[in-house]
Amino acid sequence: MIRISLKKLDPQYTATKEEKDLFHDLAAMSPADTESLQRDVKITAKGIFENSEDVKSFAEKELSVDNDRIHEAISQKKNKNQDKDV
């Protein structure tokens, strides 16, 4: 979520619709309050953006991402929601 927020803050990049959807999916999946989580992530990203000379290098080094695990969790969540609708 922080990586996506960093991308949204950087005028050199544009977050894709898929990334924005992923941001919201991850927030919704979290047991934390969605609005609070999103606010905290945005505040953290802003702090990183303002205080890092090389945001991309910082993100690659400090903000690891397991894309397969993220997409698997989202798929499972969507399947559970579809089962509830049936």
Image: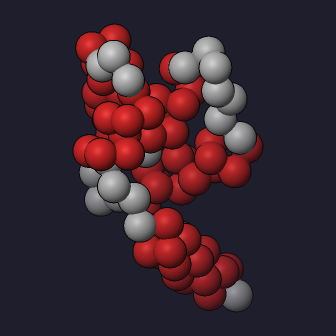
> Along the line of sight, which residue is nearer the eye, 82 or 10?
10
82 is higher (above) or lower (below) than 31? below
Q: Where in the figure is residue 7, as x and y percent of width and height?
A: 54, 31
> What's the residue at 28%, 51% (across, down)?
32
The image shows residue 4 at horizontal and vertical percentages of 51, 39
Asked where in the image residue 78 lies, by quadrant, the reply is bottom right
Q: Nearer the viewer, residue 32 or 59?
A: 59
Q: Which quadrant holds the N terminus?
A: top left
Residue 48 visible within the image = yes
Q: Is residue 63 left or right of residue 79?
A: left
Q: Is residue 63 above or below residue 2?
A: below
- Whether residue 33 is visible to the viewer of this picture, yes or no, is no
Quarter of the picture containing the C terminus is bottom right
Give the colour scheme of this rendering: secondary structure
Q: Nearer the viewer, residue 20 or 37?
A: 20
Q: How many marks?
A: 0
The structure residue drawn at horizontal position 64% and vertical position 27%, both measured from the top left corner, is 13
**In the displayed structure, would residue 2 be above or below residue 39?**
below
- The residue at 69%/50% (across/down) is 18
Quadrant of residue 49 within the rendered picture:
top left
Judge from the rendering whether residue 56 lies leftward or rightward of residue 53; answer left or right. right
Could you tell me residue 19's position as x and y percent?
A: 62, 47
Residue 17 picture location, percent across and down:
73, 43
Task: State whether residue 12 is above or below residue 59.
Answer: above
